[in-house]
Each structure stands twice: as structure tokens, then as C-alpha cells.
Image: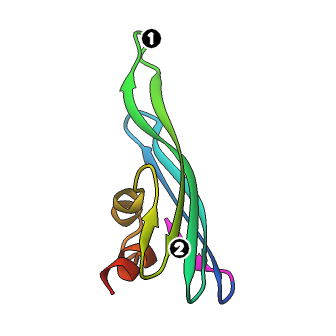
Amino acid sequence: SFAWPLNDYWSALGAYSYNLSKHYQMMTLVGLQYDTCCWAFRLTAGRNFYSLNQRLLPQYNKNIYLQVLFKGLGSIATSDPSGTIQTYINGYQDLFQQAQLR
């Protein structure tokens, strides 16, 4: 997993999880964030393992998240990827959570 600043405003993040004993991917996540003094946005995409089919092949849920945050007002999102990000990227400080608490 990684969360890496690209410059003062942009950062990239990602995570990958693989089941070594069963030989298939468990989770893949990639994303891009933009953060300024007044607003921020995050775009993430990925897939998560949810079951095996009758032929014992893995099945995945595919996700795309777009979040827009107007600092001081809150965020606009259909679902919140923050929990997944914080689970797979150890020590990740979520700018969306921090801004809402201020």
C-alpha cells in the first residue's frame, strides 16, 4: 500500500492484497486526491473479493468513488471509501475526515 504526495496539492494512493494460499487477489485500490485551502476531491477505483463461483473462481465487486469536499461545509459522496483506505494503508491521515472535524 502507499499514499504519496506528488506536489503541494496532488497525492496518489493505492493498495493491493493477495491471498497467497488460494492464489487470487483480495483487493485492489488506486486513487488520486487534490487538496487546497478551500476544497478537495478524491477519485478512487478498485475491486474487492466477495465470493467464489461454482467453478471456484473469485468474484469481485468493482467500485469507483468520487468525493468532493468544501471545507467547512462537508463532503458530497454516494459512499465513503475512507474506511477501506484507512484499513489497507496503515497510518493514513484522511484529509476528508480531518476537515469535517474542524
**Which mark identifies residue 37?**
none
Find the magenta span and give its range.
1-6
Question: Disc 1 marks which residue?
Answer: 55
What is the tally of numbered marks visible in this picture?
2
SS at mark 2? strand
Query: Which percent across, then down, holds residue 34?
Result: 62, 75
Q: Is residue 22 left or right of residue 10?
A: left
Q: Residue at x 41, y 75 (%)?
A: 94
Query: Residue placed at 38% from the left, 56% from the top?
Result: 84
- Depicted 30 relative to depicted 71: above or below: above
Is 8 above or below relative to 23? Answer: below
Q: Is 5 situated above or below 50?
A: below
Q: Are the residues tagged 1 and 2 within 8 Å (C-beta)?
A: no
Q: Residue 8 appears at what percent x and percent y? A: 65, 90
Q: Is residue 30 left or right of residue 86?
A: right
Which label's residue is closer to the chain start, 1 or 2?
2
Q: Which residue is mark 2?
A: 3
In the image, is 34 to the left or to the right of 58?
A: right
Position of residue 100 measured from the top left corner of the image (x, y, whole percent): 36, 77
User: Residue 4 magenta-drawn?
Assistant: yes
Counting from the top left corner in percent of width and height, residue 37 is at 56, 89
Give the main secondary structure of the magenta stretch. strand
Above/below status of 45 relative to 100: above
Residue type at mark 1 is Arg
Within-10-Å neighbours for mark 1: few <14, some 14–19, many 20+: few
Callout in the foreground (1, 2): 2
Magenta run includes residue 83 = no
Q: Residue at x 49, y 65 (%)?
A: 1
Q: Residue furthest front?
A: 73
What is the C-alpha distance between the residues marked 1 and 2?
36 Å
